[in-house]
Image (cartoon, grey):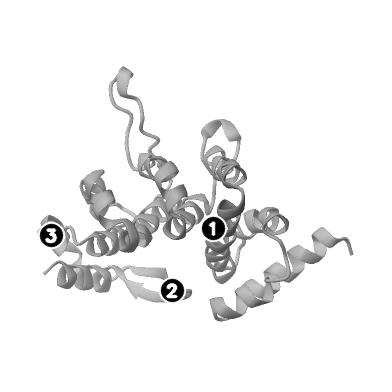
Amino acid sequence: MSRRSQIKKDLISALRLDDLTGIFSALSGYGEAELLNPLFSAICHFEERIRWHAVSVFGRVMDAMAREDLESARVVMRRFLWSLNDESGGIGWGAPEAMAEIMAVNDTLFRDYFHMLLSYMQEDGPELFQDGNYLELPPLQRGVIWGVGRLAGRQRQKLLEAGVAQALLPYLHSPDGPVRGLAAWSLGNLRAAAAGRQMRHLLSDACPVSLYWQGQIIPTTVSRLASQAIADLK
């Protein structure tokens, strides 16, 4: 078996572990560059646990890379951006989540790229102001909205100043249940007080939602997320 194949096999085995500490320990023998391509595959994996744990590992790997070689880390971030571009021929599964996790643990990459993550919630404006890159697919919207909620704990004020709370409000009425629930959760994390009344219609919404938080996948519902968000806003 080639080293590349062995790394991919070891990565998938590690990502199936229950806790992030064990995962990071299992992968400590590999360099950041060696893990990149297997991680790009893992964030598209059919197993939910593997996908999400790969997002967490991406954050750790890219933080280490950025501290040693910032330009190489920026190249990887541009690879995420390209995967979400229509011209790439792909769809970019897992890219918003991974970008957000990376920016949550590395302030320099946050400053460089957070505006791009936010652009995926924005429509293009008039011809001279076409800076929006709105994502129409609900699974990609979930990733962006989760990313906002993840970043809120580290960069709350900057996100609020960028108008993120207002951009999230329409998602409370999405036809996609997880999008509605994650929008409420993110607004709660942002402590966007004005949003409380606008999510009350979700208190009876029993649609299931899978929330990834602190290395664990938490089964919940839209109503529970909205209820907790409203409580947090108070």
Residue farthest to the front, as pictured: 68
**Observer able to see residue 227:** yes
Distance from disc 3 to disc 1, alpha carbons, whole Å, reads: 32 Å
- Give the total number of marks visible in the rendering: 3
Q: Which residue is mark 2?
A: 214
Q: CA distance from mark 2 to mark 1?
A: 17 Å
- Residue 196 position by quadrant: bottom left
What residue is at 51 percent from the left and 55 percent from the top? Answer: 98
Q: Earlier in the sequence, mark 3 or mark 1?
A: 1
Check disc 3 and report the residue beneath it: 193
The reply to whether the C-beta atoms of the residues labelled 2 and 3 are less than 8 Å apart is no
**Distance CA(mark 2)–CA(mark 3):** 24 Å
Q: Quadrant of the N terminus?
A: bottom right
Q: Amino acid at mark 2?
A: Gln
Q: Secondary structure at mark 3?
A: helix
Give the label, 2 or 1, closer to the camera: 1
Residue 222 sits above or below residue 21 on the image: above
Q: Position of residue 184 (x, y in %)?
A: 25, 61
Q: Is residue 37 left or right of residue 47?
A: right
Locate residue 106, reporting x and y percent.
46, 56
Q: Residue tagged by mark 1? A: 63
Three-letter residue code for mark 1: Asp
Question: Quick check: can you spot residue 177?
Answer: no
Q: Horizontal placement of 216 versus 192: left or right?
A: right
